[in-house]
Amino acid sequence: MKKTVLLSVISSTIIMAGGDLKPIEPVIETVQAVEEESFGTVSGQLRAFYIDRTYSGSIENNRNSLAFGGWIGYDTTAWNGLSAGVKFYAVEGASIHGSPLTSANYDPSLYGDDFSDYGFVGEAYLNYKNGNTNLKIGRQKLNTPLAGADDARMLPNLFEAAVLSNTDIKDTTLILAHVTRETVGTFGNVYGKAGALSLQSGYGLGYKEGTNGNFADMGVIALGEGTDTSGVTAAAVIYKGIDGLNLQAWNYYAHDILNAVYLQADYSFGDSIKMKASGQYIGQSEVGDALAGDVESHYWAGKLTANSGALSGYVAYSQTGDSSGTMNGGIITPWGGIPAFTQGMVTRHMFFADTSTTKVAVTYNMKDLTGLNLKATAYYVSFDIGAANTYKPDVAWTAEESGFDIKYQATEALNLRLRGNFPTDFAPGLDWSELRLIANYNF
């Protein structure tokens, strides 16, 4: 079987009204590949991302950015079950106004550290499949509850890991993984500097050691320099053997830092109105040398989803209890895993200690109405934050976020997305409004 893929991207300048001209060297100027089944496949994604945020309250400011990037990769066909793959990732920003490259003028989450453009080999792996068993070793993308890509801006988090999975047991998937290093995606740079907010929003105290395509030790990512560890060992069981019921249990052993348990259950029922009831739990405690100090944190959440025709929606509630020990900040999430039912688009305060969160969301599928593959979602989330939080210690307040998310699948390859979020009291007295326009072209 022979397939021909022709992709040509030619870009010389970006012209913005009232702005500057800047040459753009695209990640891929011309890709032309003939794919033979005996040699493998070429794939990739091109992304354009525009973001505009206006602060009000304790900060009065507007910043906006435009960037281009994505990845291109090659996977060999399997020989006796063994195959290999490599993927190159890159990002380049456009100068859309004459202001200096600072966080007051440009959004740092679309760039590398220090607003840099960069490219690197983000994935390079060997994959071996034998029957129902699969082993993948090397640089790769992970999407697990507490260690994941968090692909919310230009480039995702990527990891060095060995992942073994097996489906020999009926309706059951077994996973065993060991993760040693991580490079942090561009989203991490939105935090400016490491602290309590980054640590509980998917990025550790040492995430700056893993920016710009640098792979750093998992312990260093979590806690900073001098905390090299033996990595994170994860095991999971996923069971789907009961009609309508999905169960999953994960255990993450972050050597000399903490042990984290993640549990989730989803039960689907109903006919004319399809319903799903879901629950999740995270529990964390210190292990070994306890490099993060004493840790004793618990989070639970419930979610009820309804779907009828073109309309669907859900309501969710979560609670993070008081935490003991030196971290005393709730759930620690340094490796990009943000599975919470109650997170906002940007506000991830549900993991703060002594915090209860409520979220409602409604989605309408407009395909029958417009003939277009178009979906629109509106949501609202409220975070009742206790004084035990470490972001604003000894201060209790309520943060809120409303927003929308419109997705348009223009063609099989092209997806367009318009998103908006409008937090109030993200920190006491700090509000903003933000719009994002994203285009993804997959091949």
Image: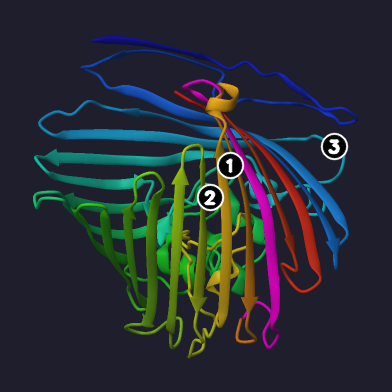
Q: Is residue 131 above or below residue 214?
A: above
Rendered image quadrant of residue 418: top right
Residue 8 visible in the snapshot: yes
Lateral position of residue 189 relative to residue 15, left or right: left
Q: Give the colour scheme of this rendering.
A: rainbow
- Gap in Å between the C-alphas at discs 1 and 3? 20 Å
Which residue matches tag 2? Answer: 185
Q: Amino acid at mark 1?
A: Met
Q: Where does the magenta region start and end?
A: 390-414
Quadrant where the N terminus is found in the figure:
top left
Q: Are the residues tagged 2 and 1 within 8 Å (C-beta)?
A: yes
Which residue matches tag 1? Answer: 154
Rendered image quadrant of residue 134: top left
Question: Residue 247 at what x, y percent from top left?
Answer: 26, 60
Q: Secondary structure at mark 2?
A: loop
- Gap in Å between the C-alphas at discs 2 and 1? 8 Å
Question: Residue 333 at what x, y percent from top left?
Answer: 48, 67
Question: Residue 311 at what x, y percent from top left?
Answer: 52, 42
Closer to the chain start, of discs 1 and 3, is 3
Q: Amino acid at mark 3?
A: His
Q: Secondary structure at mark 1?
A: loop
Residue at image coords 41%, 47%: 273
